[in-house]
Amino acid sequence: MGWNGIRGGTVTFTQGLVLAGAALLALVPAAGRAQVQTPARHVVDTPTAGTSPVGAFETRTKAFPGGGLEVRVDIGLTHWLSLGGSYGGLQIIGDGDPDWNPEPGFAVKLRVMQETFFLPAVAVGVDTQGGGYWDSARDRYQFQSRGIYAVASKNYAWYGDLTFHGGLNRSLEGSDENINPFLGMEKSIAGLWAISLEYDSALNDNRDDGAYGKGRGYLNGALSWDVSPQMEVRFVVRDMLRNAEPAAPEFTDVIVDEGWGREFTFTYIERF
């Protein structure tokens, strides 16, 4: 997959120090540390009703096509409220000048209803971090941020854990203001592995100008391995329906080959 950046820029000392420090923190060995059990906060990109445990911090480092790197930190303030922030860009891994995102992402999630035997857990939140490259001409990410959302999650005990998720969101980017439904599921395997699958209908990203979505929606999957109670490694396959297409040349000089995207994420969680 080939990319050419749409934003030139150099790495400041502060930017490099913050990103490198957070990335290293996400890879700290878990040996000898207290165990932290926690539900998933995302299926792949779409949110779940899970929040970070109270008094815990989580770092997630994502490596994606185009030499991209993104670091996210979430903190559990209470049993029902978590806050997070993220920052990254393209061409960070490799040569050439990095293309930093124009501003950090911000996230807040509030769980408004706990799961019961009959009813799902429900959460509402805001997440301003999108995915892929930033298109300054359209003032949006390639994959729009979730924006404002509401999501419900229900877990079942079936040869491990089987969890279903469904929600609605409205992105704060782009000019399409449609409400967007999404679905997801997760299945644990042997206690250490999990398969995740999500479908984002992308009704807010299917305009007729042909710059982004083709109207098929986004189907993403992931295989996760719990290296320890604190650390997870995940391999992601993105856009299996090939909904995304390269941006029109009159709007951006990014070149993106069509096909499935492949990413790795490393997540580390620990208590204060």
Image (spheres, rainbow, N blue to C red):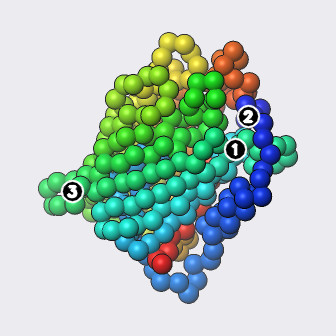
- Report x, y in % for residue 256: 70, 29
Q: Which residue is mark 2?
A: 7
Single out the residue that lies furthest toward the top: 208
Asked if disc 2 and disc 1 are in contact, CB closer than 8 Å, the reply is yes
Asked if disc 2 and disc 3 are in contact, CB closer than 8 Å, the reply is no
- Left or right: 67 in relation to 246: right
Say what amino acid the circle numbered 3 marks.
Answer: Met
Q: Which residue is mark 3?
A: 113
Say what amino acid the circle numbered 2 marks.
Answer: Arg
- Which residue appears at 70% of the width and 17% of the height? 249
C-alpha distance separating marks 3 and 1: 37 Å
Q: Secondary structure at mark 2?
A: loop
- Left or right: 199 in relation to 11: left
**Dot placed on the residue nearer the N-terminal end, 2 or 1:** 2
Single out the residue that lies furthest toward the bottom: 32
Q: Which residue is mark 1?
A: 100
Callout 1: few (<14), some (14-19), or many (20+) C-alpha neighbours within 10 Å? many
- Report x, y in % for residue 120: 22, 53
Q: Nearer the viewer, residue 141 or 183?
A: 141
